[in-house]
Image (cartoon, helix red, strand yellow):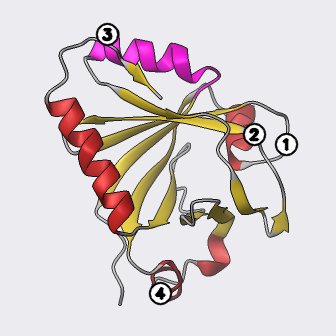
Amino acid sequence: MHAVGPIMQNGFVVPDWREAALHWAEKLGVGPFFVVEHVAFSELRYRGKPTSIDMSVAIAYAGALQIELVQQHDDAESIYKDFLRGNAPGLQHVGALTDDLDRALDDNALREKIVQDGVTTAGQRFAYVDTVLHNGSMLEIVETDAGMLKAFDYMKDAARNWDGKDPIRG
């Protein structure tokens, strides 16, 4: 069996990533946040059908835990819109990395539970699977490579050495 995990990310759906990032930075001491506005996808599917959404993410680290803030800017159907219809802004998913997304999905009988999946224009493959046992908290599995791990290490180092200034970075 190809293991999924460990959980390395908490993903929060928020109405305004900037406001949420400033809250995390000022009230909780988490930062700096690295932002990707209007994430570009080469493929995106929601419930098996091609779709397009306009979203931004802000990522920071609290120790080894990655905090991801997701804001969807449009009204396209997505897991983020689904979440906000039934919940206040908050924890929508937990994330884990894998070196082989197809194998992780197949070995863990998760392929039939995919709710949203795709590929960014940078080639990052991901799948959100419906593992909800309580309110919220899907599982996102992200296929990683050396470049992504290097970027995550850079963000972790920035968090370790953060002096509280410049909480939002492009």
Is 98 rendered above or below residue 168? below
Q: Nearer the viewer, mark 4 or mark 2?
A: 2
Identify the mark nearer the N-term, 3 or 1.
Answer: 3
The local secondary structure at tag 1 comes to loop
Residue 76: assigned label: 1
SS label for mark 3: helix
Is 138 placed left or right of 43 in the picture?
A: left
Image disc number at residue 27? 3
Look at mark 4 in the image and give the residue it sits on: 103
Instruction: Identify the amino acid type marked 3.
Output: Lys
Q: Earlier in the sequence, mark 4 or mark 2?
A: 2
Q: Main secondary structure of the magenta part?
A: helix
Tag 1–tag 4 contact (CB < 8 Å): no
User: In the rendered image, which quarter is residue 70 located in?
Assistant: top right
- For label 4, the SS is helix
The three-letter amino acid code for the residue at tag 2 is Asp
Give the vertical position of 148 relative to 105 (above or below).
above
- Amino acid at dot 4: Arg
Range of magenta residues: 14-28
Query: Mark 3 and mark 1: span between their CA atoms?
Result: 32 Å
Is the C-beta separation of discs 4 and 2 under 8 Å? no
Q: Nearer the viewer, mark 3 or mark 2?
A: 2
